Image: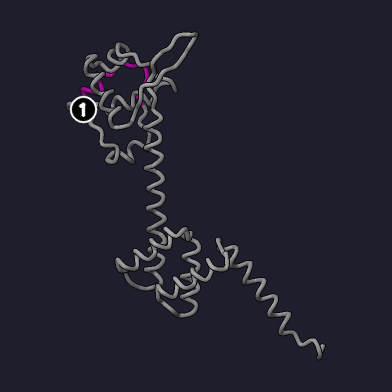
Amino acid sequence: MKENLLIDNIKINKDLIIPNYMIQNLLKLDLNLEEFILLVYLINQSDIVPFDINKLSTNLNYESNKILELISSLNEKNYISIEMNKKNGIIEEFISLDLFYNKIISFMIDKKEEINNKSIFSNFEKEYGRTLSPTEIEIIESWKESNFSDEMILEALKEAVLSGVYNMRYIDKILFEWSKKGYKTVEDIKHKTKQKDEFEEIYDYDWLNE
């Protein structure tokens, strides 16, 4: 009931649009209802929002002190910042949402990495036919920290499976050998393997009988 009253009290001429990325990351944002409403209001404004307490107070139907409190709170949480803008020779203060958008981008990147991590772990578990142990997960993480891409790790897993060896040390040896040879991508591996196969085919050709 309280939430409905707060929303109904917003005196603006158009409906506020709540972006999907705010809904998807609502728990991570750690906002109370009033902070959320103010942030949604700011997002729905133009790129440059003047730091006008009276206007914000009128449109949101909050006391000026409440607006200052909310802005201070959002500023402390690194969602907004107060910047200076020179217009027609006059310096004006405005509310910047750059910090908020950067935070949303970081959430999206973390989510993408989480999906990628789940994908690589699920591939290992599928091939091994069981859940990975904490030690095995740490080993995979160490490969990633050593700048082996997910594609390279999965290619090494593929090589191990084709050899019938389900062993992390064997995969580690494969990755070590590839690194020593300067292979950085799966394309490098396939290209060098193709060159080797072509060389061996020429070497094994029966030139005398031909």
Quadrant for the N terminus in the image: top left
Q: Position of residue 52 (x, y in %)?
A: 34, 13
Q: Position of residue 58 (x, y in %)?
A: 28, 12
Q: Position of residue 74 (x, y in %)?
A: 29, 28
Looking at the image, residue 91 sits to the left or right of residue 61; the answer is right
Looking at the image, residue 32 sits to the left or right of residue 166; the answer is left
* Figure disc tally: 1
Disc 1 is placed on an element classified as: helix
Q: Is residue 9 magenta?
A: yes
Q: Is residue 97 above or below residue 117?
A: above
Q: Is residue 179 magenta?
A: no
The residue at the far bottom in this view is 209
Q: Residues within 10 Å of mark 1 (few under 14, many from 20)?
A: few
* Quarter where residue 140 is shown: bottom left
What amino acid type should be assigned to the residue bearing mark 1?
Answer: Glu
Identify the residue at image location x=39%, y=54%: 115
* Quarter where residue 2 is shown: top left
Q: Is residue 161 above or below residue 90?
A: below
The residue at the far top in this view is 89
Identify the residue at image location x=70%, y=80%: 201
Identify the residue at image location x=32%, y=40%: 25
Looking at the image, residue 151 sits to the left or right of residue 81; the answer is right
Predominant SS along the magenta part: loop
User: Which residue carries the number 1 mark?
Assistant: 3
* Image colouring: one colour
Identify the residue at image location x=38%, y=61%: 141
Toward the viewer: 138 or 156?
A: 138
Q: Position of residue 22 (x, y in %)?
A: 34, 36
Magenta residues, start to end: 4-16
The residue at the far front in this view is 180
Quadrant for the C terminus in the image: bottom right
Q: Is residue 203 above or below residue 173?
A: below
